[in-house]
Amino acid sequence: MSVAEKENTEIKKEQDYEPEVLAFCCYYCAFAAADLAGSMRLQYPPNVKIIRVPCTGKVDVLYIMRAFEKGADAVFVAGCLEGNCHYLEGNLRAKRRVLGLKKFLDEIGIGGARLEMFNMSSSMGAAFAEAATEMTERAKKLGKNPVRIK
């Protein structure tokens, strides 16, 4: 194979790249919003994988770091609207964890932009679809996760 053919193959691989996006969604709001987005037939990227959790306050930083270790190109945590958490302050704890972890990800070279927190109610199916699309587009711009274990 010539050098030009190899370059063309690599460019094609980059164009075909579809990132893996993981979403930690609280059961009462964000997961219900994702369900509503599906019921409303709203389009969002199919490469977003949802993990349902009882509350975003349950999402530990180790879960997020493990997601990056296993190959997720982007991760987002989606919970109840601030002030409306079914477990009182779970979403506020999750927000603090996400903000701290974003700084840590920048420091270690993964990039804090690969992680985000979204708040939505169960009636905001469009907001879930927008969040999923935004994180997928962001992951495409950032490229492959630098710490993906083969």
Image: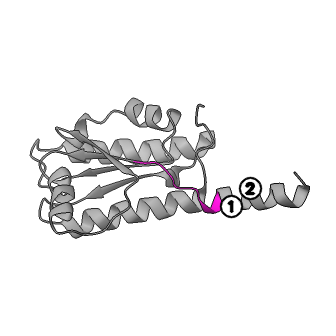
The secondary structure that most of the magenta stretch takes on is loop
Label 2 environment density (alpha carbons within 10 Å; few <14, some 14–19, many ≥20): few
Task: Tell me where residue 137 appears, x and y as whole percent.
Answer: 48, 64
Residue 44 placement: quadrant = bottom left
User: Which numbered disc covers residue 12?
Assistant: 1
Picture layout, residue 142 above or below residue 24: below
- Residue 82 in sight from this viewpoint: no
| Image-based side of 6 in relation to 84, left or right | right
Question: Height in image: 122 above or below 99?
Answer: below
> Callout 1: helix, strand or loop?
helix
Residue 69: horizontal and vertical position, in percent? 52, 33
Q: Where is residue 27 in the image (x, y as percent from the top left)?
A: 15, 45
Q: Please report contact status of discs 1 and 2: CB closer than 8 Å, yes or no.
A: yes
Count of numbered labels shown in the rendering = 2
Question: Which stretch appears magenta?
Answer: 14-21
Residue that carries the numbered disc 2 in the rendered image: 10
